[in-house]
Image: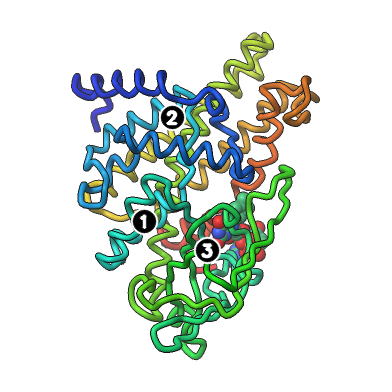
Amino acid sequence: MDFDFTEKEEAFRKDVRAWLEANVPDDLRGKAFASSRADVDEVRRLRAWQKTMWEAGYVGMSWPKEFGGRGAPLTEQIILFQEMARAESPQFVNRGGLSMLGPTLMKYGTPAQQTRHLQKVLTADELWCQGFSEPNAGSDLANLQTRGVLDGEHFVINGQKVWTSMAHVADWCFLLVRTNPDAPRHKGISFLLVDMKTPGITIRPLRQLTGEAEFNEVFFDNVRVARDNLVGTLHEGWAVAITTLAYERDLLTFIRHIALRNALHRFVRLVKERRRGGDPLVRQKVAALWIGEQALQMNAYRSLTKILRGGEPGPEGSTSKLFWSQLDSDLALAATEVIGPYAQIAEGSEWAPDDGQWEFYELLARASGIRAGTTEILKNILGERVLGLPKD
Ligand SMILES: Cc1cc2nc3c(=O)[nH]c(=O)nc-3n(C[C@H](O)[C@H](O)[C@H](O)COP(=O)(O)OP(=O)(O)OC[C@H]3O[C@@H](n4cnc5c(N)ncnc54)[C@H](O)[C@@H]3O)c2cc1C
């Protein structure tokens, strides 16, 4: 692989850089590695920012033109992410829509579903949440119990989801329900698109370690969903969900990379400001984190190349997620050690370094090894499906 960019690509970089410098809103710049998705007002601003980026042609760059993207080459997508990190731009707020639902609908959606939803995913006019996990179905997702019963041209849904990020601000949810309870576990599941304003849906926020309530419990009480909103074949939603999860581990990690790279740059700045650059232990940490970030980027290039050449993310995408979560936690901890006790001070206090973002980041990083597949589950996947070891 040739890592040098061509003149044309460097010209593109120059354009993006200038555009970002002129357009990243001041109230979002620098919130890059710890922007809130619980605060409704901040979500509104993040939404407007994604729309501005879309209008400038920078969202869904690698999506085919027929789906509202630009059909741009992989290199331009990579340059865009690098420049977003450099400009301290927040990540795209509609992450679930862009990195999970979008690719899933392109593969399994009907033309009507694609026309109805894809463009609004790009513009963030419709935010999406992921309704997969349940109280007894997290790592063991195939155990899900929320029922979807066909009644004429509608599914009637009853049950409960949990840990649903952004459900409180989402317009739509991609939901897994059990449509055939008599079939083997993986065979009776269907994948539905659900309007969050449908009567019978109750959302209860769950407070997290960060103090925020970014995820929720979602209850379904006789919620009627038109059959047209079934994605893929009835009872065969597991295959659709596996595609969604693979994209989550792969593309989402790539998008989150913007935040990680940002945090790393901030960390280096912090070390300099606090005159800790002469400390050999701190220097070693900076070097190890920097090398880790570069390795993660190279691995992401490999996965993205495969996807954009028409392939699909495979179990090897789990390496990116696994490594990213480790790096994210290491970085948060290293920053906490450099800052010392002040790292615990939250936003709102004049004593909080970087307006409390490090405190928020350190607490949020605890979730990195849980969301999108826990560390243990990813190791199982790698052991069994990549290395060919016996099943656990
Ligand atoms: C910040 C955050 C946001 C989230 N957002 C969403 C969302 O938007 N939508 C959604 O659907 N879900 C979401 N989740 C849920 C997430 O997908 C689950 O938490 C995750 O899949 C783990 O499931 P669980 O919490 O039920 O834990 P469990 O599956 O009960 O696991 C508990 C522990 O046991 C270990 N374990 C379980 N099975 C095995 C095994 N076979 N071998 C070895 N160890 C095992 C796990 O690694 C873990 O350490 C989110 C989670 C977090 C933390």
Q: Which mark is residue 196?
A: 3
Residue occupying image coordinates x 37% and y 51% = 120
Would you say 27 lies left or right of 94 here? right
Looking at the rendering, the quadrant in which ligand 1 lies is: bottom right
Label 1, secondary structure: give it: loop
Viewer can see residue 292: no
Would you say 289 lies left or right of 111 here? right
Which quarter of the rendered picture does the N terminus lie within? top left
For the residues bearing labels 3 and 1, Cβ distance under 8 angstroms = no
Q: Which mark is residue 314?
A: 1
Residue occupying image coordinates x 39% and y 25% = 83
User: Circle 2: is it few (<14), some (14-19), or many (20+) Cα within 10 Å?
Assistant: few
For the residues bearing labels 2 and 1, Cβ distance under 8 angstroms = no
Would you say 364 lies left or right of 46 here? right
Q: Residue furthest right?
A: 341
Q: How far across and down, in percent of the image, does residue 274 sit? A: 69, 12
Q: Give me the C-alpha separation between circle 3 and circle 2.
A: 39 Å
- Nearer to us of marks 3 and 2 is 3
User: Circle 3: is it few (<14), some (14-19), or many (20+) Cα within 10 Å?
Assistant: many
Query: Label 2 is placed on what type of residue?
Result: Gln
The residue wearing badge 2 is 294
For the residues bearing labels 3 and 2, Cβ distance under 8 angstroms = no
Label 3, secondary structure: give it: loop
Q: Which mark is residue 14?
A: none
Query: Label 1 is placed on what type of residue?
Result: Gly
| Earlier-in-chain disc, 2 versus 1 | 2
Q: How far across and down, in percent of the image, does residue 197 sit? A: 53, 64
| Earlier-in-chain disc, 3 versus 2 | 3
